[in-house]
Amino acid sequence: MWGQLRHLLLACRHDERYLASGSYENEDENDNTEDRSKDPISFQVRRNSSAPLLALSLTVRNEDREERNRRASYDFKAEGNADFEESPKPTAEDVRLWGQSFDKLMHCPAGRSAFRQFLRTEFSEENMLFWLACEEFSKETNKSVIEEKARIIYEDYISILSPKEVSLDSRVREVINRNMLEPTSHTFDDAQLQIYTLMQRDSYPRFMNSPVYKNLLKTVSEQPVES
């Protein structure tokens, strides 16, 4: 028994050295020579058994890399859309309309961009990011993509372990947990509405009274009207 355990440990150490160096050239030649001379059959078995272990390790690492690439791609789409919205320059009329209602602010790309920058100063940017991710998610029709994106949104914004967790009540969380059993494009509808309402009641009034909005309104009002 102990002999089998010893050979297994040696095989694992053998694979670790390979993963670190990319070859078997850095192994201790004295250990190999000693193993071959004392037990040539076990030595050959150990060398052969290390191959599937190595293949499994490399497979897991490749899968992890693919998962990171998928997540990075979706993060770019979900958050990159908001970054892209920073380019539009609002007119004086646009900025004045933002002050009339939160809906008008959120329907304007430049308004969402300015509001997101304000949320960033209050360390609540995750609310806008979650809302934007839900907007994109609700337009998805491919079932497999819906399941994948639902999992990512859940991990990024719903999970209590996420640094970007949004504030949701227990009822909405229960609804999401049930919906996640069979995700659809409406899985996060209740949560999106609750975060929208939170931003409207809590962050929007402060944005309207902030130097960010007042300075922006002053700047665009002073711009000459194009003929």
Image (cartoon, grey):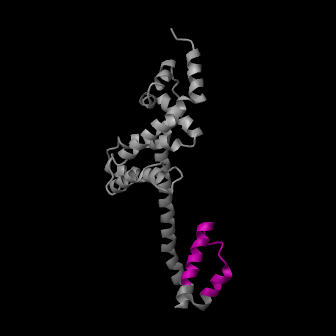
Q: Nearer the viewer, residue 105 or 129?
A: 105
Answer above or below: position of 183 versus 35: above
* Image coords of residue 192 (percent x, y): 40, 43
Q: Is residue 172 magenta?
A: no
Residue 24 is situated, as x and y percent measured from the top left of the image, at 61, 72
Q: Residue at x 67, y 79 (%)?
A: 29
Which residue is rendered at x = 47% and y = 48% of the image?
167
Q: Residue at x 56, y 88 (%)?
A: 40
Inspect this view and state whether residue 32 appears.
yes
Farthest top residue in view: 227
Q: Nearer the viewer, residue 5 or 181?
A: 181
Which residue corresponds to the image point at 60% horizontal and 24% vertical from the top-left?
A: 215
Magenta segment includes 20: yes
Q: Is residue 85 visible?
A: no
Is 5 situated above or below 23?
Answer: below
Is 191 situated left or right of 117 in this image? left
Where in the figure is residue 157, as x and y percent of width and height?
47, 50
Residue 31, position as x, y percentages in the image: 65, 83
- Counting the numbered discs, the total is 0
Q: Is residue 216 left or right of residue 148?
A: right
Name which quarter of the figure residue 221 lies in.
top right
Q: Main secondary structure of the magenta part?
A: helix
Write down the region rendered in magenta: 7-35
